[in-house]
Amino acid sequence: MLAITGIYHRLLTHRSYSAIAPVKWIGSSIACSAGQLGPSWWKGHHTDHHRYSDQVGDPHNSTRGFGWTHYRWLLSKSFLPSNLPADIEQDRILQLIDRFHFVPLLLLALLSYAIGGYEFLAAFFVSTTLLFHGVATVNSLCHWFGTQPFKSNDRSRNNWFVAILTLGEGWHSCHHAFPWSARQGITIEKGDVKYLPDPTFWFIKALKFLGLASKPRMPLKADLLSKQLPELQTISYCEAL
């Protein structure tokens, strides 16, 4: 989960911080072991999602229903991203990791079996499935349920339950208002900025402390307040039905 949130998402896709090349390579290899394909495929889809969020062109457009945005889009033509990101493709190591994305997954399965036989192999399948659904809740639950403290052109919501599952990715209203922010755990309460638990941001800070990352990007308080929605509009989608 941390490799997907901290490397695939905030580093490679949104460039919310900088990191040395081995962090990108090792982190992407670990993310591949989750069975959610390689960095080019992942970034290509997520870039489309932000460009057309909840509109035609968004691969997991939430206006097409909860089931579509959670998993059905993977079984459609939307499975293929419109473009492969040039920056990933120009890095020969990342390109190689992307093309052989299934290798870390198979190695993890074999390692699980070698350590504990069929019981550990079964645990591998269970944990991989749970991890998939955990990541998918960002696309589904966070576009249906939660609060929306920030202005955006979509239905993205802050959802505390998803934030727990995904190490801070559930603060989705902030993310869509400021996609480039290394810290997503931010909201507005009573007209003031409030910071929320964000383990992926703590991971980024740890990388910076170790000298492996630099330049984390975050919005200024004035920018956060400028995108505040009126308090009456911060209700959850289910409450509005």
Image (cartoon, helix red, strand yellow):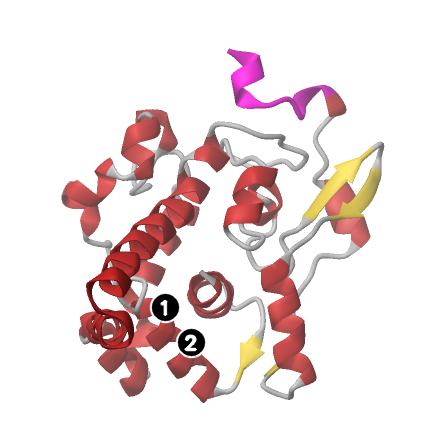
- Which residue in the rendered view is the most extreme toward the top? 241
Q: Secondary structure at mark 2?
A: helix
Identify which residue is drawn at 57% across, 46% down. Answer: 163
Above/below status of 208 relative to 195? below
Q: Where on the picture, by quarter, is residue 1? A: bottom left
Name the residue type under label 1.
Ala
Residue 228 image position (x, y, % from top left): 72, 36
Image position of 148 (left or right of 193): left
Identify which residue is drawn at 43% across, 48% down. Answer: 50
Please name the residue that numbered disc 2 is placed on: 27
Asked whether residue 87 appears in the rendered view, the answer is no
Asked whether residue 2 appears in the rendered view, the answer is yes
Above/below status of 9 relative to 126? below
- Check if residue 240 falls in the magenta segment: yes
Q: How many numbered tags mark residues here? A: 2
Residue 33 image position (x, y, % from top left): 30, 68
Please name the residue that numbered disc 1 is placed on: 31
Please name whichever residue, 29 or 230, is drawn nearer the observer in this view of the structure. Answer: 29
Main SS, magenta residues: helix
Identify which residue is drawn at 84% across, 32% down. Answer: 190
Q: Which mark is residue 211?
A: none
Above/below status of 33 relative to 125? below
Mark 1 and mark 2 in contact? Answer it, CB < 8 Å. yes
- Check if residue 202 falls in the magenta segment: no
Q: Which residues are magenta?
A: 232-241
